[in-house]
Image: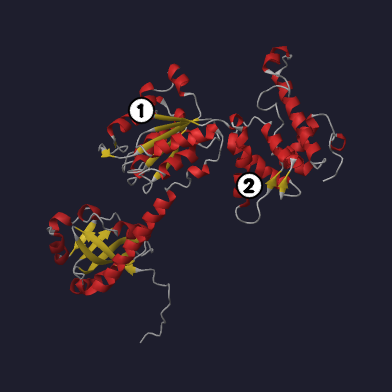
Amino acid sequence: MSSEAYEPGRIQGLTREMIDALMAMFEKASAGAIAVDRESRITWINDSYCQLLGKRQSDIIGQPVRRIIPHSRMPEVVESGDPLLLDIMEHEGQQLVVTRLPWYDGQGDANGAIACVLYDDLQPLTPLVARYRRLHQDLQAARKALARRLRSARYSLSDFVGATPQALEVKRKARLAAGRDMPVLIRGETGTGKEVLAQAIHAASRRAENPFVAVNVAAVPETLLEAEFFGVAPGAFTGASKYRDGRFQLAHSGTLFLDEVGDMPLPMQAKLLRALQEGEVEPLGSGQVQSVDVRVIAATSRDLPAMIAAGQFRSDLYYRLNVLEILVPPLRERPADLGILCEGLLAELAGGAGPEAGITREALELLGRHSWPGNVRELRNVLERALTLAEDASVLDVRALAQALPRLGTAETGRNPGVGPGDAAALPVRPLADVLARAEADAITAALDATGGNRTRAARLLGVSRSALYERLGRMSCKPDTCPGSRTPD
């Protein structure tokens, strides 16, 4: 008797000789058995499996296994070299319990695989299968609930803050849009709250329980727009191995929000127009048309009528989208809303982590003198920066906001503060490089003054690294210890 002990890991897997020795057992103990080679072509199948498949052995041998058994996972076993000990496979309405094992050559490489149908009648496994189905259904339900949450509207009309006549008119039109299932075009500068309005309209509409799907047209490469909107069929292009829904299919029965629709290329505009007119889309590479039911809300910061006149936007698409137009005013046209906006934004920035900060009347007056090219988004950024830089973050005063605000009258208008439009022609024209260098020097001087000469805080305020600030100070022909505002060391 051999005294050689069993050593785990010495045998790398089943060899062909082992398979041959076990073949008789597979024949007797299973409802069907099959073997494939390295290319996943069928090399052997027993009579029981042929009867189960309803095919003759001569029609099966030599065929790729997935041509005969579409849902077979034998290619995965051969490719990975890992067994699948227990699996439920669907085949023509039957559920088969299958085990799959790779077999190896003398060098330890997977050279094929063998599979056995353990059960072709699941009656003995009814309790186990029922539990599996319940778990599978629970998983599917959880996935659908998560998808609905991710694709649901986060904002309501109360999130569009404002009490001025301009803001109230926007809200009136939004309520009108929510009550009628029509396309809406929201126009306004960047940062005015166009997506907040779009989500609020969806949340107040009859489609509120269905998906809200947003796509920023400007953020999607032109070559991918069609696939992004209409979906992709397998084989449509290299790497497209499975079907993928487009935004239209994901938004079915809900709302599709097209942000920055003015950035859409002309060829894609024609395809979008057809989808809106016909209520159907054709996934890329499928050749099949799918019906969709979506309510479209579009938004843009661009002047679409001017683009139509320049031949950059289709007039027919414009009229299709612009059934109800909502013009969102810029923040500079409703300065009376600054107080209520600051109150809401400061509460949001506090995030429930503690008491929200207040703001002084003088600080609000300072905010009112700013032109707000970035609108509400810029206001939120200024308040957040002021809270970060302020020594006492419980109340924002003029000093705190002066550190966070851009210099008035330079970045937005290109003119010196206090110079009116009628005086612009009297200003001397200087080379652009000189103007930019002067603006940079003014910004650095202001940041150093605002931080008491603290160069680290000044760099943070300017949004540059400390080394970049030193480099710019050097270009100003001014050593750090003699520059304006460098009175206090870091």
> Of 60 and 17, which appears nearest the observer?
60
The part of the image, by quadrant, that contains residue 145 is bottom left
Residue at point 26% right, 56% down?
A: 71
Q: CA distance from mark 2 to mark 1?
A: 39 Å
Residue at point 70% right, 21% down?
A: 415
Name the secondary structure under disc 2. Answer: helix
Residue kind at label 2, given as amino acid type: Leu
* Mark 2 neighbour density, 10 Å: few (under 14) some (14–19) many (20 or more): many
Residue at point 41% right, 82% down?
A: 4
Rendered image: mark on residue 346: 2
> Of 475 and 444, which appears nearest the observer?
444
* Residue 214 seen from this side: yes
Q: Is residue 89 left or right of residue 482?
A: left
**Which residue is denoted by mark 1 in the rendering?**
320
Rendered-image quadrant of the N terminus: bottom left
Residue at point 59% right, 37% down?
A: 376
Residue kind at label 1, given as amino acid type: Arg
> Of 270 and 380, which appears nearest the observer?
380
Q: Position of residue 250 (x, y in %)?
A: 36, 44
* Mark 1 neighbour density, 10 Å: few (under 14) some (14–19) many (20 or more): some
